[in-house]
Amino acid sequence: MLHNQLGDPFPTEFDRVAATHQRIAAITRVLGRNGVVRIAAVAQADLDRERNIGNCSPQAFDEQGRVVGAQPLFCQQGVGLQIIEQAAVAATLLHGAFAEYSSVELPEELNLELASQRLGGDAVYIERSKLQSIEGESVLRYDLTLPLLLNTRWQGTPQRLFAAGKVYRREVESTTHLEAFHQLELFAIDERGKFDAWAFAGRIFDAVDRVLPRAELRVTPTHYPMCARAWSLDVLRDGEWVEVLAWGEYANWVLKGIGADPASQLALGAGVGLERLAALKYSIDDIRKMSAASLI
């Protein structure tokens, strides 16, 4: 059942390895020496094996989470990383609800000044103190939204894009926050008359239900500078609401920045924190148990 922010029932409608020394240092601050991280499994005996990250392959697991291919789901460039199967299973289940979306690789490094010039506005929504700086205006990506927008152009045909990977922030780690974690990002753009925002929202609910069947959900309006309107989605667990994702309709200035006409085209996006969602699925009470820096 869906709830609004008041708790009432909600209506049914809804680069590559060319890293500089500075970049390596920035990654090291988050992941440990040489930018290597291990994410240790802590639940489900049949899901506690670790997996090296290599090339992207959304078909690495079947709908039940069994390994069906040699390639893991996530793609990282220039950094040896590992991810536990719990988060990979969650991502695969989510992607299953958007099977026609094409997987894309995104750079880990961003130049915020160039990004602002390209899009025609500032899309950074987190505090600047939380950015993992490299040099000047260059930072490690803090989410997948901005790199995806910078690598997208409207070319007169519908686009449905999917990306998953590591993001980096300066955070005070807690039961629900990590400095380095995985996100899944969805992006869709089409002609306004052929694209329904509430149908997109409905597919998001279906995707979450695939990971957390029959979970109690709450939708809350929220704000992002790149969105004309946006919502967050919370899951009720042990009497507390836990935010797992947000989605929204991109603002006119973002559409213009990617070469689209706001009067004719509509663009929607969604971002999901995979460790947090996996922790809910496998009843892990602290996502820090899922991630531990490894000095190798």
Image: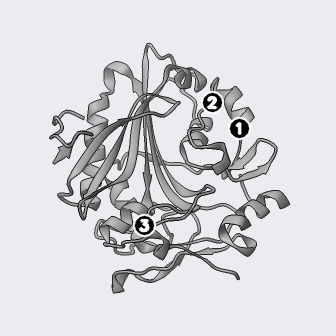
**Amino acid type, callout 2:** Asp
The single residue placed furthest to the bottom in the displayed view is 45
Numbered tag placed on residue 87 in the rendering: 3
Residue at screen point 77% across, 57% down = 23
Of badges 3 and 2, nearer the viewer stands 2
Q: Which one is earlier in the sequence, the residue at label 1 or at label 2?
A: 1
Q: Which residue is mark 1?
A: 112
The x and y percentages for residue 184 are 46, 53
- Residue 60 in view here: no
Left or right: 57, with 295 as reference point: left
Numbered tag placed on residue 49 in the rendering: none
Q: Quadrant of the C terminus?
A: bottom right
The single residue placed furthest to the right in the displayed view is 21
Callout 1: helix, strand or loop? helix
Q: Which residue is mark 2?
A: 122
Q: Disc 1 versus disc 2: distance between alpha carbons? A: 8 Å
